[in-house]
Image (cartoon, rainbow, N blue to C red):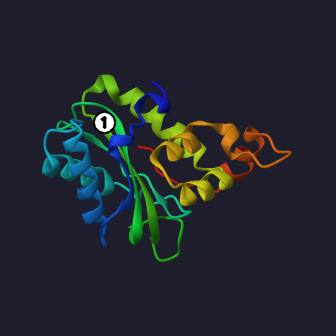
Amino acid sequence: MELKEILDEKIIDLELEGTTKDETLRNLSKRLLQAGYISDVDQFVKDIYVREAEGPTGMGHKISIPHGKSSAVRKIGIAIGRCVQDVKWESCMSEDGYQDTNIIFLFCVSDDNNFAENHMKLLADLAGKLGNDNRVRKLQEVTSKSELINVIINDSACVSEGEKASDQEEETIEELDIDLL
């Protein structure tokens, strides 16, 4: 399964409301519920917090990738929210253990073992793409959901003149620090 197969405009919010981590997770989860990706917001959020307790999902550059497996999931997806205001998020990228986050990639994955391999591959693919500074800058600037999806999946959309996407990703990928388990 590829990232482009699971990115869906119905579960993207470019003006995500919330002043706390919990509010933003719940607001994205409500969007997942409305789109038929999950059956229960409370169970899904509870399962995300089980994973959050294992280690921080803030990866620097104002991006967080909360993820976990849940029995409430009906369909795999990634809810994406760009916050109206920054939210404090646990991260090992800063000395105090927190970072300001304004882009959240909330993985929606079933706890069925058949999805485990896909979950890890998708998470690694996304984390690798977010190691590209030009891509991260463009994600902060997009004005539409379709543009956001294009920036994520299209490597050529994130290449500066004279650079190759793979070269640029190699330069910045070392800066990422996220526990993929």
Residue at image position (29%, 53%) is: 28
User: Which element type, helix, strand or loop, lies under badge 1?
Assistant: strand
> Going by the image, does 163 lie left or right of 116?
right
Q: Which residue is mark 1?
A: 109
Residue 151, percent across and down? 58, 44
Q: Quadrant of residue 84?
A: bottom left
- For the N terminus, the image quarter is top left
Residue at image position (46%, 40%) is: 123
> Going by the image, does 130 lie left or right of 119?
right
Residue at image position (39%, 72%) is: 88
Rendered view: 85 above or below 33: below
**Residue pushed farthest front?**
143
Residue 135 in sight from this viewpoint: yes
Residue 48, percent across and down? 27, 50
Identify which residue, 145 or 40, lies in the foreground.
145
Q: Report the label total.
A: 1
- For the C terminus, the image quarter is top left
